[in-house]
Image (cartoon, grey):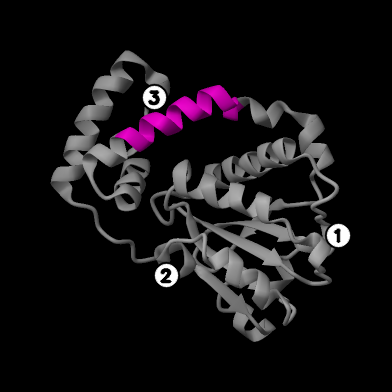
């Protein structure tokens, strides 16, 4: 079952393609495929805004060294227990990023390195998208054994910023599993940073039966 995505205006897409072709003809590194252009149009609404956002993303990718992150074995090794892109997919074919919150401590991390690791995971998962079928991701936050010392608002702010600015419309669903009751206080803060569209993609999953609507529970790691 493929996901229903909001269609984009055909004229807008044509205009954005024409503008991007001029840029990409001069510099092939600026190229974005049609699925990417549609995501930017959905997120940024107008051709002008989408075009400017794409240019900003391209500039950020070059300056941040996004394509070189996969060679940064030190950071990947250091933070590998914080998140993992799974081999398996969810029920509609989305790649899954699994984040066991218990392995996180806001007092024991370098925010810049951890943000690079997050970008590495987003890149890895995005490359695994079968874009003709579904071009977005499933992020699972597992709050099993979660304590308040695991709560890191700055890291979440960085993730939200990355998804909204440089990976627009890449988030398909965010599943929060095994949430303790006291997490509702944290969620009230986090929800205030999300736009309505993104907040609507966050789902609290309260039982294994509910989880089965999204993915097969057995695919979640037990070795992290």
Kindly identify the residue that appears in the image at 22 percent across and 41 percent down.
47
Kindly tell me whether residue 32 is visible in this rendering.
no
Can you give x and y, in whole percent of width and height, for residue 155 in the image? Answer: 67, 50
User: Where's the C terminus, which quadrant?
Assistant: bottom right
Q: Which residue is mark 1?
A: 223
C-alpha gap between disc 1 and disc 2: 31 Å
Q: Are marks 1 and 2 in contact (CB under 8 Å)?
A: no
Confirm whether the magenta stretch covers residue 58.
yes
Q: Which residues are magenta?
A: 52-67
Q: Is residue 146 above or below residue 12?
A: below
Name the residue nearer the viewer: 200 or 86: 200
Of labels 2 and 3, earlier in sequence is: 2
Q: Is residue 58 left or right of residue 187?
A: left
At which x and y percent is residue 208? Answer: 68, 82
Q: Which dot, 3 or 1, sits closer to the camera? A: 3
Residue at the spot of label 3: 30
- Tell me the SS state at disc 2: loop
186 versus 205 height, above or below: above
Quadrant for the N terminus in the image: bottom left
The CA span between labels 2 and 3 is 33 Å
Q: Give the x, y percent position of residue 201.
A: 48, 67
In primary-sequence order, the first of circles 3 and 1 is 3
Work out whether residue 158 or residue 214 is closer to the camera in this orientation and state it: 158
């Amino acid at each position: 079952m493929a996901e229903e995505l909001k269609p984009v205006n055909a004229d807008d897409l044509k205009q954005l393609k024409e503008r991007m072709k001029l840029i990409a003809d001069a510099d092939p590194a600026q190229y974005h495929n049609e699925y990417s252009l549609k995501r930017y149009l959905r997120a940024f609404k107008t051709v002008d805004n989408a075009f400017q956002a794409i240019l900003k993303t391209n500039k950020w990718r070059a300056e941040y060294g996004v394509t070189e992150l996969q060679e940064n074995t030190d950071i990947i090794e250091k933070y590998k227990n914080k998140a993992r892109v799974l081999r398996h997919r969810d029920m509609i074919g989305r790649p899954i990023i699994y984040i066991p919150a218990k392995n996180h401590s806001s007092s024991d991390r370098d925010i810049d390195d951890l943000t690079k690791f997050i970008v590495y995971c987003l890149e890895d998962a995005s490359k695994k998208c079968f874009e003709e079928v579904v071009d977005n991701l499933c992020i699972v936050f597992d709050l099993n054994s979660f304590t308040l010392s695991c709560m890191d608002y700055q890291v979440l702010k960085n993730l939200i910023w990355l998804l909204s600015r440089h990976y627009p419309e890449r988030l398909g669903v965010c599943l929060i599993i095994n949430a303790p009751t006291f997490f509702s206080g944290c969620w009230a803060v986090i929800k205030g940073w999300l736009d309505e569209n993104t907040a609507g993609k966050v789902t609290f999953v309260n039982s294994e039966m509910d989880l089965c609507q999204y993915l097969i529970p057995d695919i979640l790691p037990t070795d992290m």
